[in-house]
Amino acid sequence: MNSPAVDTLFDELEMSYEPDNIYYQTISAVLEASQRIGMSHREQLILAQPKNELMVHFPVRMDDGSYQLFKGYRVQHNNVAGPYKGGIRYHEDVYLDDIKSLAVLMTMKCALMRLPYGGAKGGLKLNPRSVSTDELMRITRRFTAALGSNIGPDYDIPAPDMGSNAQVMAWMADTYINFAEINNKVEARSVVTGKPLAFGGSEGREKATGQGVVDVLEVLMPGMGLDLSVCTYSLIGYGNVGSWTARLLAAKGAKCLAVMDHKGAIYNAEGIDAEALATYVRETGSVLGFEGAGEISEEEFYSCEVDLLIPAALEQMIHQGNAKLIRCKVLVEAANAPVTPEGENMLVERGVTILPAILCNSGGVTVSYFEWKQNRQSEQWDAETVDRRLKRIMQDGAQRVLLAATKYDCSLRIASYAAALEHLKEIYELRGIFP
Ligand code: NAD
């Protein structure tokens, strides 16, 4: 349900609210927050739709000599604060509205953390596990060529997301360097972030999102009466974000009781060894069969009593169907938009605190910013410098959200959007609208 003011805006834009549509869910909450902070009507109109939505189709020769047609997206939501920035997802279930929603979240994330970027997101409709390494390289190069001048180090800077990785970023950068009409070919690698260390990557980028989750928890948990060093948690997803969050939480003393991924769920009341599980998942592709825990059903996973439930997989995984099972005190959104509005209402009614995604998982884009900055200054920072600067930015972001929650008397989610929008509002008011 939208507020009447958001409904009026939807009517004006001829958008009809579809409750299951992730883009409408995301933009409604953002517009709700924009009303709270008193954003002007014209600024709300601008934010309600992305600036550009690009869809490309391109053929690629497969290993067996046949040709396959692929579909890719790049959505550029807003660039008032700086170049568009956001990951590229490789997944068979990628749709335009998912990418639009994720692009909005990137605008919000960069604004909340006061990074000099706008928001974008890309997607390629592909299961990366279904193609060979050579095919993945050719697909990535053709996708990059199809995006052409729609990306660039000063215009739109992709990064890895689900299903893509540092190697994919290296192929993207190399393709762009070969195509782009830029004099400084070395600096042109800053067209993407999340690259391998040897090719312009940053120390700490791989673990950055998990590190950011832990930095935020360190600031917020004492105020919620919880102690990181003795808390228990369960985790959805054991990929980049999930596995790094678990390994870093283990170092703080937190105990992981249960993990679920795309193949199944596991449980150990004594705690799951995060490092051993990461090695096992690297070798087998899933948490299932890990000998340090027993297999449980999805229903048992959601019913586990824990202090923290950390979704670090797909969007909309927590909904009214499973929210009733959940027995956690705090839900930590390491994934983007993992909870539907109905799921959120049910959890909030039961006293669960939700720590919003644009705060919790912005460690990734923050270290991407560090990488971009290092590339442009021909510098290489050490791991301690990255960690220290990241922690400072994450802590400042968390404080902004707490302040906004008090100022606007609202949930942490609306507060996170409000704190982000205050920044964008200020920029719009300084810059005005062209012409
Ligand atoms: P990843 O591809 O490395 O891992 C995804 C994990 O999700 C895997 O463990 C997979 O098994 C699991 N998964 C997939 N489908 C599932 C299902 N149906 N049920 C349970 N588990 C399932 O991806 P990632 O990079 O770790 O990203 C995870 C989430 O975090 C995404 O929402 C992504 O947008 C978000 N995120 C990632 C970064 C980053 O730096 N990688 C930054 C910010 C946000």
Image (tube, rainbow, N blue to C red):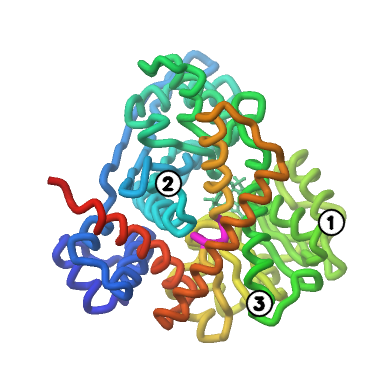
State left or right for residue 229 relative to residue 11: right
Nearer to us: label 3 or label 2: 2
Q: Residues within 10 Å of mark 2 (few under 14, many from 20)?
A: some
Label 1 sits on residue: 273
Label 2 sits on residue: 116
Q: Residues within 10 Å of mark 3 (few under 14, many from 20)?
A: many
State left or right for residue 207 relative to residue 16: right
| Residue 101, x across and y down, in percent | 38, 55
| Residue 414, x across and y down, in percent | 42, 72
Assign the magenta stretch its main secondary structure: helix
User: In the picture shown, does residue 240 fall above or below 260?
Assistant: above
Circle 1: residue type: Asp
Q: Gap in Å between the C-alphas at discs 1 and 2?
A: 38 Å
Label 3 sits on residue: 328
| Residue 35, x across and y down, in percent | 28, 73
Q: Gap in Å between the C-alphas at discs 3 and 1?
A: 21 Å
Between residue 305 and residue 102, name the one nearer to us.
102
Residue located 41% across and 66% down the image: 417
